[in-house]
Image: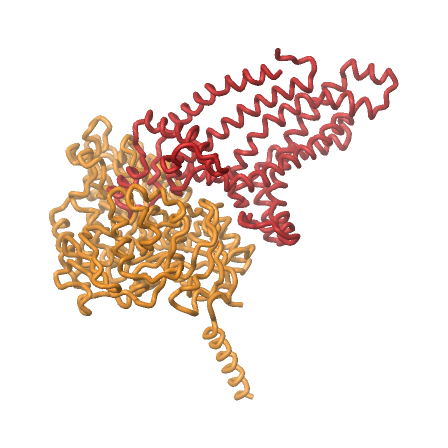
Chain colours: A orange, B red
């Protein structure tokens, strides 16, 4: 009897393996994907919107993609160039990619190094308005050594030379299709922008801008067994709750992108049992930026600049520390984020080798400690309970973008700060204005005419060098640089700048990780950035979908060719 | 009448130009940035380049001139070109380009019209067909149970927002019963009986939600207008002449009562084209309303400007049509 059971199980196992092995291109029918932001364009170089980049990642391939664990996997290249295999030069100023020689475009023409060179020139054209320009930062030239070898030369030493052509933001486009679309002409090529010819698993069947994209399997895809799905429908529009419902409750869709639904509503939807929530944590951190300069309107042009002088009370590190200690991050996660968030004490929470553990004390709220700290520093409660010192009241203007979760977080933090005797005025600004670069608006997050501001930031790929470089002195926004700059707290330290410069010269991954941790710890222990929540990517996948792993480092659809239908 | 219509049409031209300029100025003054929605990983220098390539920040008179030229000259020429009449050099024409899609705005709009007309237009037709009989009977049998019920339903339809009725229908008919799809498929090609059934199925819920709302409004107008007329002297005269109730109500009263109702219906037609923003969002019909809202959210000014202006044209046009119909229906009104 036992033997029989084993036999049956073995047969069952063998048959499942058999179905996997027999899976062939187009055998699994139609894949229904819902994005609550509709896709506007399928040329990722002309749109930085996540939805557009992900929709085009089904069609276009880069030289290498990031796997869900953060490692790089060659796509159109044969291997990842490193110093060890000679692909990256010893002086770190060039990288040489070897391309696969068996790849053809979906129209049947061969893919060559010329296409890679063209793609770089397309993005580097100063008149094109290329959204992936930062991927090509410091690229001096790109040359084809032969039909299947490409060398990228940088003007400076690049310890992490994987900006160009790694990840869905900077894929390879076909020279033959786009050669008339360089520079200022880029937006005029509507046909190419709406239906690029690619090397990826799918080709565009029909595209309705801001509505829906339908794809069919690429007959010329490099892996003859993939993709498993014959067609894909990517429907846009609605809101996050509606798209999630269409996967979890009605089962009309197989995959819903970017779930942003209140935790309790999500539980109800999950109860229908038609799908599950998948999440993965990349580098996004919801953080409070602390204004170190004086945002007083009476300063006129010097408002919120280093010239305007230090902030009346946030320049005191004890106040900044007390504000961080008073926050109960667990409650913020529970109320606003659910599976979307984790408590974090670092502005650089991932990848794992870069994550510091030196600041974990912030995970527990310490109201008494915060009060004692303020008492000690001479900030004593006034008649109305608000602490003051030398006539300066701890009264904070706290701004963020308009978004119901953010407003909920604001209200909770206001309450927590009230407990330690800090008064808070809340303000929210339309996201288009807050994150927009309108010079004439006083409400942008760069101008930061407030005491505290909250938003989320992250970095592309897995290398934090550019991201940690956000807080060097030269990045301070001011009227002199048209308020362009990422150092919102106006933090300036020679030591930090030196670390940042050192990282730009260091290739060893261990040393880079030590430097990044040190920079992170410096920012954390100065309390110029108060991290709150490590935000994950959350999506909903139907139970009938197999091989889906959420990828926080690249497009969520980067490996959709591996997805299958399971019963 | 013809003179009057022509005069009104001529007057409409300066009016519309002024409207277009006002829309342009408002949009220009509005805060917002087409690159504001991009991820923060894109640095500010790159954003500045993108804005430059889009032509954001041009002086307002130049931007306005370009748009007017695009709308009134290049677009008509392009469409003439499409039907085979070529005037001038087609490669010289800069059509109005959307910031977000980098595609011509008019192509986007044309792509949206079918589903908007089908869903919103049909709901308007159904709304009218339901509303007129309800209004007539409610007024004729004032305070009867039918009238009370009709009043109750129209109050509910009028005061319960469509985002609530829409969600309620999805929960009942899509989630619980599984009868209708909750997502509208705009790519569905109706070419057989089966696809026709699918099309009907996916239209049932959005059309029902909007038809309830439209019918509520119009039935109240119809009822009020009937009541006004039923107490008039000429009705008593007609009855005294020995006419049947059917003739009195359907010929004498209904015809006169329809005059203001037809005006209301005509004035409501432009709202069909502006779509039903909320209902389109809920059922993902992705028609003109959804296009407008996406344009506003993404600060896609060329798209918003063009769409709003087209709505303005329709409103001016249907105001004129309402006035003309009024003149035809009511012999007492003469414009000349």
Q: Whole-percent x and y of residue B222? A: 69, 26
Q: Whole-percent x and y of residue A7? A: 52, 85
Q: Residue at x 36, y 26 (%)?
A: B65
Q: Nearer the viewer, residue A189 or B31?
A: A189
Q: Nearer the viewer, residue A519 or A543?
A: A543
Residue B172 in view:
no
Q: Nearer the viewer, residue A426 or A234?
A: A234
Q: Is residue B224 above or below residue B74?
A: above
The quadrant of the picture occupied by the C terminus of chain A is bottom right
Q: Is residue A142 above or below residue B115?
A: below
Q: Is residue B140 above or below residue A507?
A: above
Residue B318 in view:
yes
Q: Whole-percent x and y of residue B175? A: 59, 53
Q: Residue at x 54, y 37 (%)?
A: B276
**Is residue B11 found left or right of B235 in the rendered image?**
left
Q: Is residue B109 above or below residue A200?
A: above
Most distant residue in the top direction? B336
Q: Whole-percent x and y of residue A355? A: 25, 59
């Amino acid at each position: 009897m036992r033997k029989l059971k084993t036999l049956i199980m073995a047969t069952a196992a063998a048959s499942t393996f058999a179905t996997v092995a027999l899976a062939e291109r187009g055998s699994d029918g139609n894949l229904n994907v819902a994005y609550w932001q509709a896709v506007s364009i399928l040329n990722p170089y002309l749109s930085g919107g996540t939805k557009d980049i992900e929709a085009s990642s089904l069609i276009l391939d880069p030289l290498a993609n990031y796997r869900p664990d953060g490692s790089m996997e060659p796509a159109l290249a044969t291997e990842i160039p490193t110093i060890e295999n000679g692909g990256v030069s010893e002086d770190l100023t060039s990288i040489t990619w070897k391309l696969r020689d068996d790849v053809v475009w979906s129209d049947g023409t061969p893919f060559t190094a010329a296409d890679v060179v063209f793609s770089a020139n397309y993005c580097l054209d100063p008149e094109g308005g290329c959204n992936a320009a930062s991927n090509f930062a410091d690229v001096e030239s790109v040359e084809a050594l032969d039909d299947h070898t490409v060398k990228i030369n940088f003007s400076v030493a690049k310890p992490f030379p994987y900006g160009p052509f790694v990840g869905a933001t900077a894929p390879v486009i076909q020279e033959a299709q786009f050669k008339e679309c360089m520079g200022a002409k880029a937006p005029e090529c509507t046909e190419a922008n709406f239906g690029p010819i690619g090397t990826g698993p799918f080709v565009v069947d029909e595209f309705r801008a801001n509505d829906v994209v339908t794809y069919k399997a690429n007959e010329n895809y490099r892996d003859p067994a993939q993709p498993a799905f014959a067609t894909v429908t990517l429907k846009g529009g609605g809101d996050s709750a509606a798209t999630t419902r269409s996967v979890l409750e009605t089962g009309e869709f197989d995959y819903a992108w970017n779930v942003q639904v209140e935790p309790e509503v999500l539980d109800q939807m999950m109860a229908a049992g038609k799908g599950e929530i998948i999440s993965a944590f990349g580098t996004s951190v919801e953080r409070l930026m602390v204004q170190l300069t004086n945002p007083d309107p009476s300063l006129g042009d010097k408002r919120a600049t280093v010239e305007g002088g230090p902030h009346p009370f946030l320049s005191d590190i004890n106040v900044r520390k007390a504000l961080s200690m008073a926050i109960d991050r667990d409650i913020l996660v529970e109320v606003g984020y659910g599976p979307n968030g984790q408590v974090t004490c670092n502005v650089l929470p991932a990848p794992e080798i870069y994550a510091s553990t030196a600041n974990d004390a912030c995970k527990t709220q310490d109201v008494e400690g915060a009060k004692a700290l303020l008492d000690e520093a001479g900030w004593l409660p006034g008649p109305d309970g608000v602490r003051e010192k030398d006539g300066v009241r701890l009264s904070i203007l706290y701004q963020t973008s308009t978004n119901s979760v953010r407003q909920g977080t604001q209200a909770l933090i206001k309450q927590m700060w009230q407990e330690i005797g800090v008064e808070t005025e809340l303000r929210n600004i339309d996201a288009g204005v807050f994150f927009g670069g309108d010079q004439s608006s006083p409400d942008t997050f760069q101008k930061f005419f407030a005491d505290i501001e909250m938003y989320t930031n992250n970095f592309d790929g897995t290398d934090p060098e550019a991201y940690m470089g956000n807080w060097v002195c030269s990045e301070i926004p001011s009227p002199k640089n048209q308020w362009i700059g990422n150092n919102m707290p106006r933090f300036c330290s020679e030591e930090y700048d030196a670390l940042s410069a050192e990282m730009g010269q260091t290739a060893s991954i261990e040393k880079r990780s030590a430097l990044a941790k040190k920079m992170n710890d410096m920012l954390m222990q100065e309390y110029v950035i108060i991290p709150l929540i490590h935000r994950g990517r959350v999506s909903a996948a139907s139970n009938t979908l197999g091989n889906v792993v959420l990828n926080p480092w690249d497009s969520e659809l980067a490996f959709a060719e591996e997805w299958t239908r399971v019963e | 009448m013809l003179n009057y219509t022509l005069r009104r049409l001529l007057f409409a031209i300066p009016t519309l130009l002024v409207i277009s300029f006002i829309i342009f100025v408002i949009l220009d003054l509005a805060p917002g940035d087409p690159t504001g929605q991009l991820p923060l990983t894109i640095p500010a220098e790159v954003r500045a380049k993108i804005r430059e390539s889009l032509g954001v920040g041009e002086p307002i008179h130049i931007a306005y001139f370009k748009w007017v030229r695009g709308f009134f000259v290049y677009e008509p020429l392009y469409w003439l070109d499409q039907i085979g009449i070529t005037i001038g050099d087609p490669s010289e024409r800069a059509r109005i380009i959307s910031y977000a899609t980098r595609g011509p705005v008019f192509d986007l709009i044309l792509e949206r019209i079918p589903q908007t007309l089908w869903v919103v237009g049909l709901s308007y037709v159904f709304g009218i067909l339901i509303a007129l009989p309800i209004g007539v009977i409610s007024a004729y049998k004032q305070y009867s149970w039918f009238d009370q019920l009709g009043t109750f339903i129209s109050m509910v339809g009028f005061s319960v927002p469509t985002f609530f009725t829409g969600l309620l229908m999805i929960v009942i008919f899509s989630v619980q019963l599984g009868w209708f799809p909750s997502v509208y498929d705009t790519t569905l090609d109706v070419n057989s009986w089966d696809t026709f059934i699918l099309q009907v199925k996916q239209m049932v819920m959005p059309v029902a939600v909007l038809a309830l709302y439209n019918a509520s409004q119009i039935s109240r107008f119809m009822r009020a207008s009937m009541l006004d007329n039923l107490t008039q002297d000429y009705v008593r005269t007609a009855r005294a002449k020995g006419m049947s109730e059917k003739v009195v109500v359907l010929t004498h009263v209904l015809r006169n009562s329809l005059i203001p109702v037809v005006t209301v219906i005509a004035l409501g037609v432009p709202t069909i084209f502006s779509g039903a923003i909320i209902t389109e969002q809920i059922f993902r019909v992705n028609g003109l309303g959804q296009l407008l809202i996406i344009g506003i959210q993404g600060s896609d000014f060329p798209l918003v400007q063009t769409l709003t202006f087209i709505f303005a044209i329709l409103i001016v046009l249907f105001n004129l049509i309402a006035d003309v119909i009024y003149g035809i229906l009511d012999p007492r009104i003469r414009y000349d």
